[in-house]
Image (spheres, grey):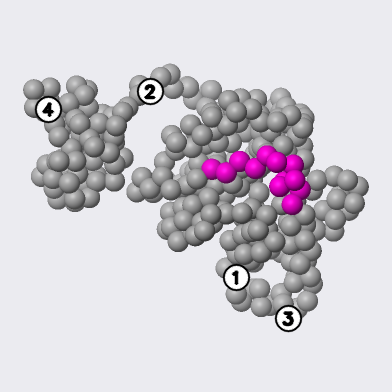
Amino acid sequence: MKLTIDQDKCIHCHLCEKACFLTRFCGFDSLEGAAEQYCIDCGHCVAVCPRQAITHSGVKSTEPIGHVPDEAEVLNLLMKTRSVRHFKPDPVSRETWNVLRRAAECSQSGLNAQSIGLTAVEAPDTLSGIRKALLRMYDKLEKLAAFPVTRLAARLSLSPQDYHAVISETATQPLRRQAAERGEDPVLYGAPALLLLTGPAASQTAREDATVISQNIMLALTALGLGGCYMGGLVLGCRVFKYKPLLRALDLPKGHAVHQALVLGTPTVQLKRMPERKCREIQFR
């Protein structure tokens, strides 16, 4: 059996059945029967059991959940978590990478797939190669957007979201080129590390899973006094254009795609106040 319940410990509170969507929505009468056929190993049944009466072959261990920050602490963390575009050259410590790994492990994923892998790029030569490939890609996109025929082809072949992203990225390429000529880094912002969140290219949930993980990592970075910035152009170049020089520089595993990417490190400045944000209204229906 994939799951067994120790009847000597069980107090028949039925919390495990309430936590399991299989017994609640899929017509199974027992937790054991549900687990045998369709279990996704989320471990919720084990996690809610007050008597530790459930043994699950897909859940080898659990750990207690400690203090949860109150609403003020959560909002402070969110306010402090902003995009960073200027970094100190200090390397990211292995202790920090371990915290980020744990943040990824604790993140949600569709159907508990846990398919997103983390690749940390720190080698200066590799970062330089990625930087050069990105600048060349932006040059090509700028030329594509400059001619009506190729611009129309892009509009017809891309989703509206991707098309507008391309036009937005190409509009600022002259400024990037000028910054690069001055010796600045207009694409990776001089960050000492780049984090790639990769997973199966054909996965239906990988993009969403990677986005959830990357935001949790951004929050963890803030808690550590560090910061990061999303690399939307890099993801666009890999996912939409499959720009070969960039893909070669990233050296992805076969069958995998970059679903999210961010640069990270120690910010040169720290925010002391939160800039004004648009007021969000909740519509009740």
Mark 3 vs mark 4, CA separation in Å: 69 Å
Q: Nearer the viewer, mark 4 or mark 1?
A: 4
- The residue tagged with tag 4: helix, strand or loop? loop
Kindly identify the amino acid type of the residue bearing the numbered disc 1. Leu
Kindly identify the amino acid type of the residue bearing the numbered disc 4. Asp
Q: Residue at x 79, y 63 (%)?
A: 139
Query: Residue 134 at x, y = what percent?
Result: 73, 56
Mark 1 vs mark 2, CA separation in Å: 44 Å
Extreme right residue here? Answer: 182
Q: Earlier in the sequence, mark 3 or mark 2?
A: 2
Confirm whether the magenta stretch covers residue 85. no
Q: Earlier in the sequence, mark 2 or mark 4?
A: 4
Query: What mark, if any, has residue 158 been given in the picture?
Result: 1
Mark 2, residues whose alpha carbon is within 10 Å: few (<14), some, or many (≥20)?
Answer: few
* Residue underneath mark 4: 6
* Residue underneath mark 2: 65
Kindly identify the amino acid type of the residue bearing the numbered disc 2. Ile
- Judge from the rendering whether residue 194 lies leftward or rightward of residue 212; answer left or right: right
Confirm whether the magenta stretch covers residue 125. yes
Mark 2 vs mark 4, CA separation in Å: 23 Å
Q: Earlier in the sequence, mark 4 or mark 1?
A: 4
Q: Could you say which quadrant of the image residue 124 lies in?
A: top right
Mark 1 vs mark 3, CA separation in Å: 14 Å
